Amino acid sequence: MNFKNSLSLCLFHLFLVGCEKREEIQKSLHVEPKASQIVVDKKSLQKELNEIDTNSYLEAYIIHIINNGSNGILGFSGGVMEGGIATKEDAPNIARFVMSLSGKQSSDDNAGKKAELFYTSNCGGCHGNDGKGLNGAFPDLTQKSFRGIEKRKAYLKSNLD
Ligand code: HEC
């Protein structure tokens, strides 16, 4: 084999190696989930749907809204609710107090008294001291089912069809 031939063979080899590499990268970027992952995801969606009407789910939801706010997606004319009004430590007690307004939780200990004071000074202005909201502009926090939870339920159901 002369020099020219071996050089082109060498280049051809490099080209092949290059192709292999590219294929590897494309494979690793391939985002389509494997069938087993879809099963796992559906399982966790189903698990969430099974728990969505429980008080512990509602408590976690209220804590989430206190910490992160709600950016208007729920469609109340009151607009946006900022997150972080309370500290992360206080949020669970405030959530329990909110639930006590409709008898879904008890909140009559010392932490509950502190949470009540926090609620009436920081949340009640919009949601009402009794939690019943203001003429539909601000959500009623004593309602049976919260709008954000209903939306999540619809999303979960549509993904499990
Ligand atoms: C400035 C007015 C304002 C204050 C203060 C406020 N909120 Fe809200 N809150 C809103 C609005 C407006 C929404 C609906 C936002 C949307 O449409 O996404 C909302 C949504 C919520 C929701 C979800 C309701 C649902 O139906 O899904 C919860 C729970 C909530 N607020 C709890 C609280 C708590 C607890 C506090 C006090 C730490 C608080 N909010 C303080 C205005 C307020």
Image (cartoon, helix red, strand yellow):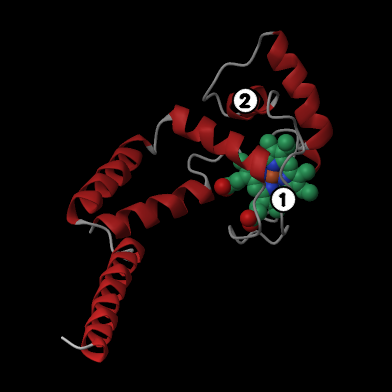
> Residue 101 appears in which quarter of the rendering?
top right
> Residue 87 appears in which quarter of the rendering?
top right
> Residue 117 at what x, y percent from top left?
80, 23
Identified by mark 2, the residue type is Pro
* Ligand 1 closer than 8 Å to label 1 CB: yes
> Residue 36 at what x, y percent from top left?
19, 50
Instruction: Determine the secondary structure under disc 2.
Output: helix
Crowding around mark 1 (Cα neighbors within 10 Å: few <14, some 14 to 19, many 20+) is: some
> Residue 27 at what x, y percent from top left?
28, 65
> Which residue is at 30% across, 38% downward?
47
Instruction: Determine the secondary structure under disc 1.
Output: loop
Decide which of tag 2 and tag 1 comes sooner along the chain. Answer: 1
Q: Nearer the viewer, residue 135 or 161?
A: 161
| Quadrant where the image shows the N terminus | bottom left
Asked whether, in this view, residue 79 is left or right of residue 17, the answer is: right
Asked whether, in this view, residue 68 is left or right of residue 55, the answer is: right
Q: Which residue is under mark 1?
A: 81
Q: Nearer the viewer, residue 147 or 84?
A: 84
> Which residue is at 35% across, 35% downward?
51
Crowding around mark 2 (Cα neighbors within 10 Å: few <14, some 14 to 19, many 20+) is: many
> Which residue is at 46% across, 28% downward?
55
Which mark is drawn over residue 92?
A: 2
Q: Is residue 80 above or below residue 118?
A: below
Going by the picture, which residue comes out furthest to the top? 109
Q: Is residue 144 above or below residue 38?
A: above
Q: Is there any visible trace of residue 139 in the rendered image?
A: no
Q: Nearer the viewer, residue 116 or 111?
A: 111
